[in-house]
Amino acid sequence: MTNTTENTAENTQLMTVVVTGATGRTGSRVARAAEAAGLTVRAASRATGFDWWDSSTWADTLRGADAAYLAHPSDVGAPGAAEVVGALAREAVGLGVRRLVLLSARGEDQALPTEEALRASGTDWTVVRAAWFAQNFSEGPLVAELRERGELVFPADEVREPFLDVRDIADVVVSVLTSGDRYAGRILNLSGGRLLTFGEAVAEIAGVTGRPLSYRAVSTRDYGEALAGFGVPPEEVAGMTEIFGTLLDGRNAHLSDGVREVLGRAPRDFGDFVREEAAAGTWKA
Ligand SMILES: NC(=O)c1ccc[n+]([C@@H]2O[C@H](COP(=O)([O-])OP(=O)(O)OC[C@H]3O[C@@H](n4cnc5c(N)ncnc54)[C@H](OP(=O)(O)O)[C@@H]3O)[C@@H](O)[C@H]2O)c1
């Protein structure tokens, strides 16, 4: 711990970190936590002129930075993610951005080529493999359904998942960035501290909000058909259903100790997340 503290003081001095996805679930928290730790944050999203799909926008964002947090905007295992992350990482290395931290997904085979592309870029890399976010229940595409129809429909059957609070991801990323080389070349697996089925998670939200919220499991195929019905392009549907099919087949129904390893404390509890979001009115009809 002493070593980490010394490194922190030394490395935050004048460190500039590019935070991609800075308006998103993890990036917004990474940006806040990095600023709180004394780093200079360069927020990156389309609003700042940075576009993952337009490589001509990358250099202006990366030039002069020391480090970058990379959150691929669609899934990290989506088709094409490895190519774009690899190209961005090589450009970063060429511009002297020496530390890259990639947000990846725990147990997602489809994300492995993206991780490999990062490693092959020649950077000082760290991969943060996250469990399913607790904030999937409070921010993002699943929330409106839960809030407005009182039902979450998802192809997760009765599988258990250790939902992870994205604030823990942010704390880990900042600790990685401010700990010198300590986590360079490391894959960190992060999860929350409790295994819950999606039904149990929704029941916790129902219990705290007093609303009769429920979870309905559907098959991956039915879920894909529903997505297609909402106009999601067929290639995207195929990619998403393949990823959900592997992520939610039981392989991730275990805890990982990355939060404790890096932060020296337990992960935030799903119940605390639910109480905070309920108090903020997240699931009010
Ligand atoms: N959800 C989970 O449970 C989970 C678990 C593990 C890993 N992950 C990984 O998390 C990553 C997503 O991170 P997140 O959830 O923090 O993000 P998010 O909340 O989905 O937000 C996406 C971010 O990307 C930005 N963005 C979208 N398109 C862009 C583009 N073309 N160029 C530049 N920026 C763009 C958005 O900003 P603007 O729209 O303002 O540009 C926004 O800041 C994915 O790679 C996913 O695989 C998710």
Image (spheres, helix red, strand yellow):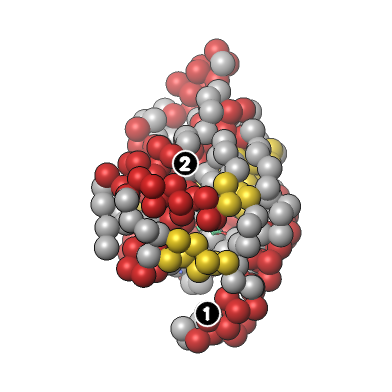
Residue drawn at the location 35% of the way across and 45% of the way down: 208
Give the percent coordinates (x, y) of residue 202. Answer: 46, 54
Residue drawn at the location 54% of the way across and 55% of the way down: 198
- Could you classify mark 2 by the number of other residues whose Cα lies within 10 Å: few (under 14), some (14-19), or many (20 or more)? many
- Which residue position holds label 2? 270
Q: Is residue 136 above or below residue 168?
A: below
Q: Is residue 9 above or below residue 250?
A: above
**In the rendered picture of this protein, how many numbered marks are placed on residues?**
2
- Could you classify mark 1 by the number of other residues whose Cα lies within 10 Å: few (under 14), some (14-19), or many (20 or more)? some
> Which residue type does callout 2 highlight?
Phe
Q: Tell me the tag on residue 227.
A: 1
* Callout 1: SS: helix
Q: Nearer the viewer, residue 215 or 82?
A: 215
Residue drawn at the location 53% of the way across and 81% of the way down: 226
Give the percent coordinates (x, y) of residue 103. Answer: 57, 50
Of mark 1 and mark 2, the one earlier in the sequence is 1
Give the percent coordinates (x, y) of residue 281. Answer: 26, 52
Q: Tell me the tag on residue 89.
A: none
Give the percent coordinates (x, y) of residue 241. Answer: 64, 72
Q: Where the C terminus falls, by quadrant? A: bottom left
> Which residue type does callout 1 highlight?
Leu
